Image (tube, rainbow, N blue to C red):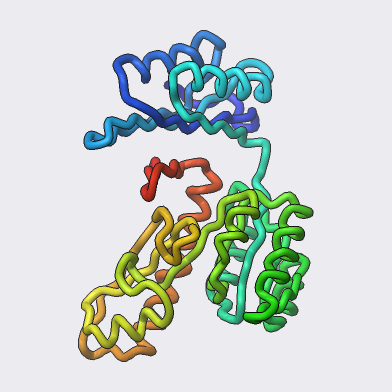
Amino acid sequence: MSSASNVSAPVITALLHGPDRRGLVAQVAGWISLRGGNILHADQHRDEEAGVFFQRMEWVPEGDAALEMREFATFGDSLGMTTDVRVSTEREKMVLFVSKFDHCFHDLLLRWKAGDFNGDFVAVVSNHADLAAATATYGLPYHHIPVTAATKAEAETKQIALCRELGADLVVMARYMQVLSPEFLARIGCPVINIHHSFLPAFAGGKPYHQAYERGVKLIGATAHYATAVLDDGPIIHQDVARVTHRHGVEDLVRKGRDLERLVLAQAVRWHLDHRVLVYGRKTVVFD
């Protein structure tokens, strides 16, 4: 492996997983090498219990990147692997879902403005009007779609239509305080990343900091995960914790937790956009 000679050249990233067998690493590296590709990074993992092989490859192609992506996907299929291939020149479009809490909202948008993400926010969607003015300062459109128990299905239909119109590749829930329905998740057509303010699977559902305080825990956490039809049960991308003691009240836990939420959600979004997260079953492999 060697460094890229031209940092502006397209970089292809491939994630593969499937039944493990002898020679997979050599076959994949050989395929890239025979076509003149310059491998920048290679990583692999084997789930010993399941017998599943996982691999992430980054390389600069010698020829047409779009053609090589299609050919590599076919090659991956021939190995019996599930293959996902991306190219660095295609930046993912993200839609940010928020309610009233603004700490993750501001953190993500400031990081985006600073160039921290290999993707772009294209709109903000909220069930409240509170963050409309703040969103305008970031130069983004704000879509206020109120949600009540009676209008939830209609509101989600509008959200789905909007995300499709915007060409969303990823929805990020930055403390969006609504439970997305199974129908929404089935129809949205892209991954959804959520931040939950606890160290899942502990304290799922509402008011986890209050639950943690009542239980007298010595650690609190935050969890970024892909949203699924089962609440707070999706594949976990990233988690972190902070120590607390009997001297900390609920407000202390909330304050410490918000710091964790910012960092954990931002890192999860970054890893997703960098094509480092491979989902299988209820778990993920996150390549560093």
For the question of whether residue 5 can be seen, the reply is yes
Please name the residue shown 59% across and 71% down the image. 105
Q: Is residue 25 above or below residue 171?
A: above
282 sits to left or right of 164: left
Location of the N terminus (image quadrant): top left
The percent position of residue 203, horizontal first and vertical second, equals: 33, 74
Describe residue 236's horizontal placement relative to residue 88 as left or right.
left
Query: Which quarter of the picture shows residue 209?
Result: bottom left
* Quadrant into which the C terminus falls: top left
The mark tally for this picture is 0
Regarding residue 131, the answer to whether it shows in the image is no
213 vs 29, left or right, is left
What residue is rendered at 33% in x and 14% in y? 23
53 or 6: nearer the viewer: 53
Which of 67 and 116 lies nearest the eye of the viewer? 67
Vertical order, 31 against 98 (above or below): above
x, y (%) of residue 75?
52, 17
Residue 222, placed above or below residue 171: below
**Where's residue 276, x and y in %?**
46, 42
Residue drawn 68% across the image and 19% down it: 64
The one nearer the camera, 3 or 192, is: 192
Q: Position of residue 108 (x, y in %)?
A: 57, 64
Identify the residue shown where x is 48% and y is 56%.
226
Left or right? Give the position of 155 relative to 41.
right
Answer above or below: position of 113 versus 285: below
